[in-house]
Amino acid sequence: MIQAASFLAAGLALAAAWLLHSKIAFLRRWFIPPALIAGLILFLLGPEMTKLTWNGIHFLPNNVISTEMRAFIRQWPPFLLGYLFAAIVLGLESGAGKSGFLKPVIQQNLFVWFLAFGQLAGAYAIYLVFFSDSVSPLIVHVLEIGWAGGPGSAAAMSVVMRDLGQPGIGDLGLFSATLGQVWGALSGIWIVNYLNRRVVPEQNAPDSAVLEAKPDVRITLTQPDSIAEASVRKAKLRGALRIFALFLAPLAAVFLSMGLTTLLGTIADAWPAGKPLKNIPLFSLALLCAFPVRAVLNKAGLMTRENAETIQNINGQVLDWIILAAMASIVPEAFIALMVPFAALCAFGALFCFASFFFFGPRMLPPATWKELGLINYGFATGTTALGLMLLGLLHSRTREEARLIYGIAVPFNAPFVGGGIISLTLPQLTATGAAGWILLALLGALAAFYFTCSYLNRRSV
C-alpha cells in the first residue's frame, strides 16, 4: 500500500509541476525543471514541513507524505541512477564526428574538463583554507556537481552522499544547481548583450540561410483508406515495440550490475582484503555492464542514430524521477547547517565562470568560435547545456551552427566523466579518505596541462 501511494503521489506531483511549468513563464525562462518543482511539492507535503505551526495553526495539511512513504521514495535514486549511466553508454551515437573538426573538438573537450576541474580545485582550496576544521570535506563536490552537472547530477550526488553519511551535503546539491541556473541566466544575458554591442552588423548578411519555397511537382500515388490505415497501425505498433525494447536495454545492464554487486559482495565476505569491493556504487557497475549490452545491440544492428536518440529521450524521463526523489528526501536541519561554506563555494563559482569566459575562453577555445563555444560552456558550467544554447541563440553570430557541431561532437568525450559524470560521482569516495590536499595538487597539475595544450593548439592555428 505504501509503495502504491508513493508512486501515485509522485505521479500527481509531477503532473501538477508540468501544469505549473506551462502556466508560469518565470519557470520556463529560468529553466527550472518540472521535476524539481514536483520534488519540492512532495518535500513541502513531507513529515517535517507538515509539523510547522504558528499559533497552533498548521501551514500545510497533515499526513500527505508519511515518513514511510518518504523512506520508500528515498530508495529510488540508486536503481534509477544505474539505469541513467547505462543509458548514457547506450545512447551515444556510433561514428559521430568529422575529421576537419579534430583540433577544435580537442580544445572544446579539454575546456570542459578545465571548467569541471577548475570548480573542483577552487572548492578544495576554499575548504582547506577556511572550513577544514568545521565541515566534512565532501562539501567540495557541491559546486562542480551542482553547477557543471546540473539538477540531474545533483540528485545523483544525494545518493552518493547518503551512502557516505552526509545527507545534508547531498541535499545542498539540488539548491546549488538551481542557484547556478539562475545566476547563469542573469549573468549570461548580460554577457550576450555586452558582446552584441561590440559586434558591427554586416549589411545584407542574413543570420542564417533562408530556403526558397519551391512548388512540389512530385506525383504521389494514393492508397485506399483501409490499406493506409492498416499501414499506420502497423507502423505505430512497430514503433511502440521498438521503444519498449530500447527501454529494456539499459534495464538489462542494471540487472547485470545487480548480479555483479552480489558476486562482489560474496567475494568480499570470503576474502578479507576484498572489503572495498562492497563499496563500488551500483551506477559504476551499470556503466561497465552497458558495454556488453551495447555490443549485443550493435551485433543486432540496433545501434542506429534514431535508436540512440530514443534511448536519450527515455533517459530524460528517468532523470526527472531521480530529481523528484532526491528533492522529496531533503533533510532541512542538515541543509541549513551548511549555508556559510555553501555561500563561499557559490561566490567562487560565479567568479570562476566569469573568468572562464572572458580570460580562459579566448586563450583555450578555437579563435573562430570562442565566443559561441564560450557561451554554451558558460551555460553548462552554471547549470545546463540548454541554458548555454539559449544564450547562443541570442548572440549575433554567423558561426553558431559550427559551434553547436563542435560542442556536440565533443560531448561523448566529457559528459560521461566530468560535470556530474563517473569521475564526479566516484571522487567523493576518495575525498572521504582525507586526501583533499593531494587531490588539489593533482587537479592543479591537470588544469595547467589543459591550459597549455589548448594554448599550443591555438598558436598552431594562427
Image (spheres, helix red, strand yellow):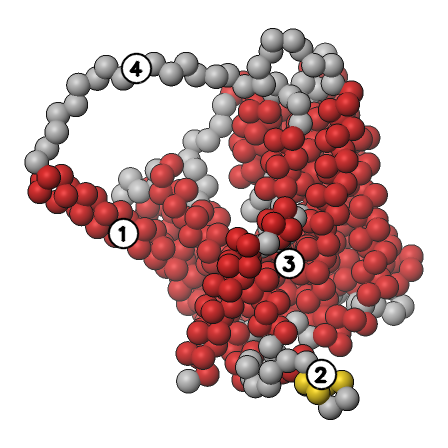
Q: Give neighbour class at mark 3: few <14, some 14-19, many 20+ (Cα, 10 Å).
A: many
Question: For the residue marked with disc 4, what is the amino acid?
Answer: Pro
Q: Nearer the viewer, residue 265 or 333?
A: 333
Q: CA distance from mark 1 to mark 2?
A: 47 Å
Q: Nearer the viewer, residue 160 or 179?
A: 179
**Rendered location of residue 49, percent (x, y):** 67, 79
- Disc 3 designates what residue? 154
Q: Give neighbour class at mark 1: few <14, some 14-19, many 20+ (Cα, 10 Å).
A: few
- Disc 1 designates what residue? 240
Q: Give neighbour class at mark 2: few <14, some 14-19, many 20+ (Cα, 10 Å).
A: few
The earlier-in-sequence mark between 1 and 2 is 2
Question: For the residue marked with disc 1, what is the amino acid?
Answer: Ala
Question: For the residue marked with disc 2, what is the amino acid?
Answer: Leu
Up/down of 139 relative to 53, above or below: above
- Disc 4 designates what residue? 215
Q: Nearer the viewer, residue 91 or 17?
A: 17
**In the rendering, which numbered label is found on residue 420?**
none
Q: CA distance from mark 4 to mark 3?
A: 51 Å
